[in-house]
Image (cartoon, rainbow, N blue to C red):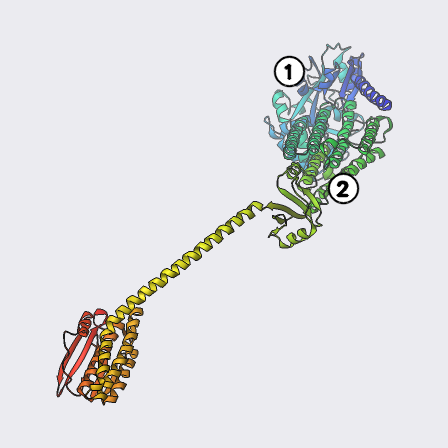
Amino acid sequence: MKLIGFVIILIVANILSGCSKELKSDSILFTLDDYSLYPKVVEQILPKYTTGLSDNNAYYILDNGAVAEAFDTQAAGAIGTGIANHWYPQYLATVVIAVDRNQTDADVTSWNDLLATQQEVGFSDTPGNVQMLLAAMAYGLEGGHYTLTKPINLLTSLQERHLLKINSFEAPIIICYDYQAVNLMEKGRNLQIIVPEEGTLTYEKGLLSNEDLNFSGDVNQVLLAANLRLLDGESNLTIYPDERAYRPAIRVDDYNYFSKATQNASCLMERNVLKARIYMSIDQREHLFFALIYIIIVTIWVVAIMIRSMQKGITYAALFTGIILNGWILVRLIKYQVLAVPILSRYLWYSYYIFQLSLPLVLLWMAWSIDKPKNETCPPKWWRVMAICIGFLLVLVFTNDLHGLVFHLELNRPDWDINYGYGIGYYTVLFVCMANLVAVFVILVQKSLRNPRKKRFLFPLTILLTFGVYNYLYITRFPFVYATDLTIVTGIFAMLLFETCIRSGLIPVNTKYIDIFTRSPLKLQIINQDKDVILMSASAVSINMDDLDKVLASTPAPILQKDDSLLFANPIPGGYALWQEDIRKLRQLQKEIQKSTQMLKDANVMLAEEEKLKRMTNEKNAKKDLMEQLGGEIDEHIIQLSTMIEKLAFAENPSQEITRIALLLCYIKRRCNLFFKEKANATTDSGELIIHIKELSEITYYSNVQIAISNEIKESIAIRHATLLYDFFYWVVDLAVQKGCPYIIAHLRIDEGFLTMGLLPSEDIGFINPESKLIVAITAEKGEIVTKDVDDTIGISISFPKGGVAYD
């Protein structure tokens, strides 16, 4: 601990000493310019001040009491906002085209000639200069309402043809200030200074200060001796073009418009022309906007995780991850705000590794604590050892200025923050970060082995491998990757890895279901494919293997257990959900229902027996009624039969009487059949009637009465009509036997819609008594008996309309 405290004190002292060293109040800092003699001029006119070079803006320097070189466009803003109290313009700087006549004889008179020459063109894009140069070109190409569009297009065309040389004064053609071209000429370059005929801008340069400056000697003479143009345009005409050549050059008169028009100059130069830093912020505005958007996204993501997660360890991990990511981007934002103090900016850069090393450590703790109870989430000893190792790595990073084991920096170079190398310490830091992330992933996969979705780990694994490839390409300065912002991209990968682990089930964001499950009053269990119990509710009981095998085999149907409970099983990913339902009450209810059902059955049997008795009684009554009706039909014939049998012994012609008795017996039998058929059917086949008639005819043969029968009817006839026809035929035949008529012709037909039976005896057998019962029955059916004299006999016919109307 004492060693760590000593190192921290050493770092702080180094920062403070560096800041105090660079920010002395009696210093004058000049913008980086290898081709200006103005610093030597200031040494003569302000001998009490020390001079130095800086590529940073003048505003921070002024806040600390120092004096800064500036353009008039910068001075206007500083004076207007109160950053500086005094502005001392001293010489002019006109943006010109310098053509090296030893390298090219191209005819260059304007900005548009630069592309036509097909010569390399040098251009300086150092901070501050890029705005001035682009604004001058824009004024010449676009006029007073310039927008930087045409100069950016011109430089882009040069870059696409590989003719643009950035920060090079060795090219045949150079876009620079006139005093820079003069300085190069004094060093032996054969340059021709050309003021573009379309126009250009002339800037005033001088000193900004919060204190009054007392200049020594003749300032103008010193400036002229240094080959600088005075504010009134006076210059060494042996080197500078004459006053007429400078006529296209004007001075800036609207500084607000200049500031607005050039505010995106650095961004346009980097992205549109150089195709560099496309995916990262460039100027202060973008640094702020990028940081703000990033912080909003991270905050929303963290809140979403905290809402979804019910496990405290996951919630804390998401919260700490959000704090780390937002803290990292805030340090990055502050770093870009203090670029004027290189040592402070450098140590803020070193501070990045606090977050870069802490983030995997937090994720490692989260992976370890996922399945731990709330009171057991304190980091284990091995994690604390890892934290101590990371602490030593952070000390190594922050003391890099002393040993250079992490970064190889050339601090005497102004671009040390861009052109640097990596030492073994950096690779150690990167290895530890990636090793921790791999450990996080391995722990999560190991803890999710029983997770049915474990195969989805390929997605977060892809994110992890992609992040590793990204880091490798960034270290090797692969152009596309190196043009991205490491801080933001690392944060995005961290969120993606965290989120994909959640989506794939490696990180369970909701564990309250375990408490709900275990405290459920239902008898629930979850088993895996090996039939091992994973979760069990408090009221659940162990299930023996026999019942378990039975229920799994009968799924989805349940099985009945000995304790009057049903055991159900339902397949789920990775296993089965089992639950028991107590059906004792249902069984009791079932018994009661069975008892009630039996009582209903018994009652039904009694009712059926009662119905049977009633039916038997009704049948007896029906039979009685039927027999009474039948008696009404045949009682007279039975009495007649008895009488005939009694008188047979006294008959004059016994053979004839026997025939009549046989006819009556046959008639009574068939008449009974027809009676019952009348009760059962509405129609009968005509052929059946003919059979009954022929049966009577065969009996009459024994009394020498022969009957010829013919039938034209092929369809069914009404059973009542058939009965009456049979009654009528018997009556005629019996009469013919009594009269001794030897022959009768019977013919059955349908004539003009009427069912007609015609009988033609060979002799007259007498007339029918119209008062007889048969005649009444025939009349009730709308029948008609017709007799007709035929030679020596009388023809008899009986007819009925079909259904009370004529037959078709």
Q: Position of residue 347 (x, y in %)?
A: 78, 25
Q: Nearer the viewer, residue 301 or 99?
A: 301
Rendered location of residue 177, percent (x, y): 72, 25
Q: Using the rendered view, name the quadrant where residue 519 is placed.
A: top right
- For this view, does 409 lie left or right of residue 515? right
Q: Which residue is mark 1?
A: 80
Residue 110 seen in the figure: no
| Three-letter amino acid code at the position of disc 2 | Val
Q: Can you say whether 599 is above or below 176 in the image?
A: below
Q: Which residue is mark 2?
A: 442
Residue nearest the observer in this picture, 11 or 780: 780
Nearest to the observer: residue 389 or residue 633: 633
User: Label 1 crowding class (10 Å Cα cut-off): few <14, some 14-19, many 20+?
Assistant: few
Of 91 and 75, the residue lying toward us:
75
Would you place residue 491 above or below residue 724 in this image? above
Residue at mark 1 to residue at mark 2: CA–CA distance: 60 Å
Crowding at label 2, few (<14), some or many (≥20) Cα neighbours within 10 Å? some
